[in-house]
Image (tube, coloured by chain):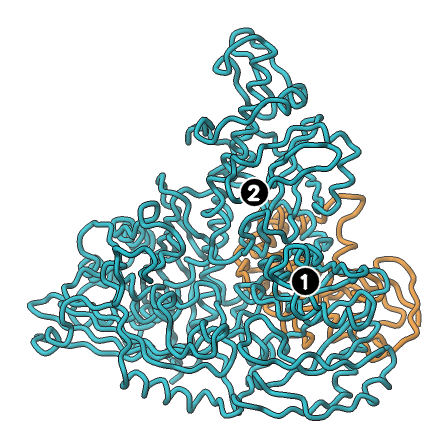
Chain colours: A cyan, B orange
Amino acid sequence: MTVHFKNVSRRSVLKGSGAAMGLVIAAPLIGNHVMAAAMGEEGLTKSVYLSIDLDGTAHINIHRVEMGQGSRTGLPQIIADELEADWDRLVFEAAYGDKKFGDQNTDGSTSIRKNFDVFRAAGATARMMLEQAAANEWGVDISGVEAKSHRITNKATGKSEDYAHFVAAAAKLPAPEADKVKLKSKADRTFIGKPQQNIYMNDIVTGSSQFGQDVRREGMLYAVAARPPVVGGKVTSFDKAAAMAIAGVVDVVELPTLTGAPVFKPLGGVAVIATNTWAALKGRVALAAVFEGGANAGYDSADYEKTLWASIEGKDISHLKRGDCDAAIAGADKNYEADYYVPHLNHAPMEPPSATAEWDGDKLNMWVCCQDPQSVQSAVAPFVGKDPRNDADLASIHVEATLLGGAFGRKSKPDFAVEAAVLAKHAGKPLKMVWTREDDMRHGYFHTVTAQRVKAAVKDGKVTAWKHKAAYPSIGSTFNPAANAPGGFEMGLGLVDMPFECENLQVDAGEAKAHVRIGWLRSVANIQQAFAVGSFVDEIAHGEGKNTADMWMELIGSDRKFNPSLEVTGNDPSNPRSPGYGNYGESLDRHPLDTARLKAVLQKVVKMSGYGKDMPKGRGIGISVQRSFVSYVACAVEVEVSDSGELKIPRAWMAVDCGTYVNPDRVRAQMEGAVLFGMSIALYGEITAEKGQIVQGNFDTYELCRMSESPFVDVAIMENDAPPGGVGEPGVPPVAPAITNAIFAATGKRIRRLPIRDQLSV
Amino acid sequence: MEFKVNGRAVSYSGDEEMPLLWYLRDFAGLTGTKFGCGEGLCGACTVHVNGSAVRSCQTFMEDVEGADVKTIESMAQDGKLHALQQAWADNNVPQCGYCQSGQIMQAASLLAENANPSDQDIDDAMEGNICRCGTYQRIKTAIRQVAEKS
């Protein structure tokens, strides 16, 4: 099937094709996600997500970006389902950045869960208007007609007409009130819950898809930059003449120096502008730029680890306190204690960041592999003399999100787009900012570095206390230099929401100051926090001579829905503004923490993997489970460890409960991918700093798993009617602890420090 | 210098030390060949030179004089997908898709040399091509599917 893909900015093409007379879906239906957009001479108000031409062609405007997670296929499936559409008569359009589209930040595994209801309503409203138009024409009640695959049938006579026949009449009807919109029953679903091929498939396999790095404009220049290797550093000298002497180099320009909190600002340094990328790269070498380090020049990962452990020993910042852990530990029959360490990580998307900017008078057009075109607008504005709080100024920065060659959180930070805008303005020509692999590796917004100490008390064969402390630089430091300890939003990703019923539970944080830009990476603090929790459950199980699955069941306890906010330190649950448990931005009524669902996915992977069966020497299965992004995922991993310590992972099993799912094939793909992502974290992931500079540069020093390491992954999707949960991120957290637990099962060697790398060699 | 790109004769007179990658992307506008690492470590830039898979970021202009260069854009013929492209689509292989041009070009070279590769042969041939999204399992399935049909 060929998919016709258009950018909304080419909307004018449609104006002359009869679209103006077509059906558009009234805005109020979609509430505050929609602003009425007057269509000029057409005089119609359209939904920002759906419109239908007189020939029945339905335009679906997708406001979220595509980075491999499948949102730009899943979101249209939701509308198509309620619209009763013929998939071949859909045109997919990619929205530019504009707040009228609602939240476009493609981050936090939100695209489906935050838009499911809105997109269903948009599709259902259009279907009902078409049905009403048919009912009117045939003189019957709306219940006497039925829409199916772009046609409406008169149930009494059997007469049937294409949607195209009713569009003009439907467009003159009032939209049904929001509470009158009839959604289809689950049994009647045609696209939701059914596998659907990626709308970009043909473009991807033929090489014609356009990623940020692939943008080309007439007369375009290319830029690369030498940036300060230490965050907050400054350039002290560079050889402009040498760079200019390289054939193809047209200019050498200093970038604005970073001051204050990093946010999404450029890092500074010197850019080389050339007529092609190669010339710019050569020019950068010739530049021989020299930098001074600044305040972070002393950052050294080996030393910093000592600082983190000192923080673990030091002041406790309370996040949750239930009962009295210290008393339980003092009176225990047996105590457990373990320290876990997870280093900095980098996103390393296959496509390094890139942005293209082209000025047209005071108007700026941009094509960016960004996760949020609106944050590009607001990040760019102050650097090009525009006011980010002024709507007209923001509108004068037109940002189209290209396809993203992976992102994992890196491309929500559009520092690279700001560079492109500034340099294009200076050059007076269209300009593409190219980041190389080394640029991306050394100038990332790194996943934080974490030390954790966990203690547990066992009395009469029961775990009576779990005391957990974590110290790591906060993501908050990227926005507020005063933030010097993990925030509640981070401690709520696997610690404060720990599902354990034991009578004594304590979660504390330790202070830690940031010296690099700290960012969010696929599943964020769940990475290190699920690693510690999942490992420690396994440690207690082995210590108590129990099966780890049974240990989890015992710790989780009864089937219940619980509210961590009630126990969050300093929270006043009667005050809605009081900072409690964030629950990934969802209400606890809609998305409770449901221990029955958590236990069910765990039991599922136990069954799939045969966990608990006897394994030959050197082989073992490990398990772990985590609720994150309001979905539940359990992972089992089988490992083989040779006598010389060589690790193989032949198989992995994932059980996911993401509530109602839209595209099961993409849910499976995300789980398969999460296993590889988690494996790369567990086996190899480590970013280190020396003298404030990142040591790693490319895939030789920051390794990722390759084909021969790839296990066969078996995925089970749980069936239920819960609202949709996240899919892109929640597969990652349980993978690393499942691997290290499997290694323990196979060898008796406990890995408490990531990455595993050569810890198994003997 | 003269050489061929996707069957078309082209000439080039610039810096001979420039990697072929930048010729393809910046000069010829063939952006299906991707820039991933610039060091021959990831395989995203894989193309065929005289029928063999090479990393275009490690192949320099001076090396392609008189050569026959083929990129992902040449794989589909007359609107019909190459068997590997079709297998990629049938198995819903891509996630973000960025590495897949290189993966397909590498797999095509493998099958040209070995029509019936073992799993070990596939691992060996594809080891240089990183997929950060983790689509390896489906890539393997797609390659096997084409091998079995041939």
Q: Quadrant of the N terminus of chain A?
A: top right
Label 2 residue SS: loop
Query: What residue do we see at 66% from left, 51% from top?
Result: A96
Tell me residue A323's x, y (percent): 14, 67
Tell me residue A354's x, y (percent): 68, 67
**A497 to the left or right of B89:** left
Name the kind of residue labelled 2 in the image.
Val
Tell me residue A604's x, y (percent): 31, 50
Q: Is residue A639 above or below residue A394?
A: below
Badge 2 vs badge 1, beta-carbon distance below 8 Å: no
Q: Quadrant of the C terminus of chain A?
A: bottom left
Question: Which residue is under mark 1?
Answer: B102
Taking depth in this image into account, of A468 and B64 the one nearest to the observer is A468
Query: What residue do we see at 65% from left, 23% from top?
Result: A167
Name the kind of residue labelled 1 in the image.
Gly
Label 1 residue SS: helix
Q: Chain of mark 1?
A: B
Residue A34 marker: 2
Within 10 Å of disc 1 (Cα), the crowding (few <14, some 14-19, many 20+) is: many
Give the total of numbered labels.
Answer: 2
Per the model, the C-alpha gap separating discs 2 and 1 is 41 Å
**A11 to the left or right of A119:** right
Q: Chain of mark 2?
A: A
Taking depth in this image into account, of A538 and A256 the one nearest to the observer is A256
For discs 2 and 1, the disc positioned in front in the rendered view: 2
Taking depth in this image into account, of B65 and A77 the one nearest to the observer is A77
- Please indicate, yes or no, whether residue B109 appears anywhere in the rendered image: yes
Within 10 Å of disc 2 (Cα), the crowding (few <14, some 14-19, many 20+) is: some
- Please indicate, yes or no, whether residue A755 appears anywhere in the rendered image: no
Tell me residue B24's x, y (percent): 80, 65
